[in-house]
Amino acid sequence: MMNIQDIRGFNYQPSYAYTGADIWRRFDAAVFDRELGLGKKHFPKMNGVRLWLAWEVFAAGSDKQREQFLANVDTAFGIAAKYGMAVIPTLFNRWHAGSPEWGGVFLDNFLPGRSWANHYFDRQWRGYVTAVMERFARDPRVICWDLCNEPFSYFTKQPWSDYTDVAPHEQQWLENVYALCKQAGAQAPLSVGFWGGAKFLKPLQHLSDVLNFHRYWMGDPATKDEFRRELDECVAVREQTGKPLLSSEACWGSLDNAKRAEIIEFHLHELNQRNIGWLIYALHHSYVADLHWPEYGLVTEPGTLHCIEPDGSLRPGHDIINRYM
């Protein structure tokens, strides 16, 4: 099996989708095949893809719809394998952009006794995880599970652990997800895709068999050394624990193609220098937040992070990625 540090790939949000639920309620295998195929065409050494699942589609479905959801996930895994890509499935999402909102898990879901959302979520997430694991726990196409994308996304300057009214409940929920996946026999290693670096990886390393982080360099030359130091801190956790290290999101966006290429070149160089596996966010132009040009919807601070254009061509300057694969 491929080593985690050798992963060179992308996150993938299909072009037709606005939200996570949209991906799976309107699942289009032909689009998955075409766009992952374009990824392999433009980036022949691409060997990994991070696919985002949507718990709410399963939870809200009838028995027949739940079976269809699992079948669609199976089809998506098969398309990735067809193009020689190992799969990193993401079970839950805690990143909320609002441009448009992707969906996922909200504070209401895991804060006990606060709302109907918590009352139902506590029942529903377990059934969802159990069903996914029953189907895919021993699937050789899965190289690593990402239990949750960017938990503790409180977006302030205070340490996440200072939020004592929220953080312990979120951590307990993650620990329950981790335990249930292990109990269900997950063969691929488990991880949590933390935003930031060692500030999460070090205290929460028990939640990850693979150290999984997102640390973006946003293009300011004055912050390059700070970025390097934070990568070195992540490497130090790898050395202390002996666990593989993966940046499952990399390369901040821009509406300026040349600036985006500059960001990509610096970021991937620094990751490769430290033998860190990586997945760029993201492969293809999409209606999903931060992955489209302004004429396709609201654009906010990140600009756009896509690499393949709506017509299937490679975004100018983005062939630089092949130099680092």
Image (cartoon, helix red, strand yellow):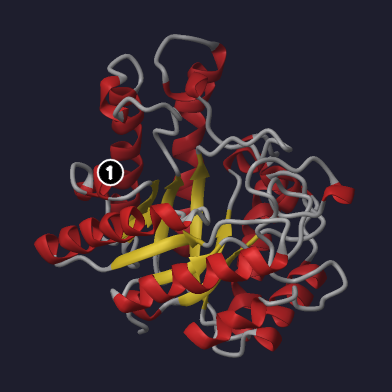
Q: Secondary structure at mark 1?
A: helix
Q: Residue furthest top?
A: 114
Q: Dot 1, how many residues are within 10 Å of its Cα: few (below 14), some (14-19), or many (20+)?
A: many
Q: Could you tell me residue 109's position as x and y percent?
A: 50, 23
**Nearer the observer, 60 or 86:** 86
Q: In the rendered view, would you say 63 is above or below 258?
A: above
Say which amino acid is labelled 1: Phe
Q: In the rendered view, would you say 69 is above or below 265?
A: above
Q: In the rendered view, would you say 118 is above or below 190?
A: above
**Nearer the observer, 237 or 12:** 237
* Residue occupying image coordinates x 35% and y 84%: 1
* Residue occupying image coordinates x 77% and y 54%: 292
Q: Can residue 49 be seen by looking at this rendering?
A: no
- Decide if residue 130 is on the left or right side of residue 65: left
**Nearer the observer, 160 or 63:** 160
Q: Residue furthest front?
A: 222
Q: Could you tell me residue 321's position as x and y percent?
A: 57, 79
* Residue occupying image coordinates x 51% and y 74%: 265
Q: Report how many numbered discs are placed on residues in the image.
A: 1
Choose top left, top right, bottom left or bottom right for residue 232: bottom left
Choose top left, top right, bottom left or bottom right for residue 169: top left
Q: Could you tell me residue 22's position as x and y percent?
A: 75, 46
- Decide if residue 205 is on the left or right side of residue 294: left
* Residue occupying image coordinates x 84% and y 67%: 310
Q: Can residue 178 be seen by looking at this rendering?
A: yes
Q: In the rendered view, would you say 298 is above or below 48?
A: above
Q: Which residue is mark 1?
A: 200
Q: Could you tell me residue 143's position as x and y percent?
A: 41, 72
**Nearer the observer, 13 or 309:** 309
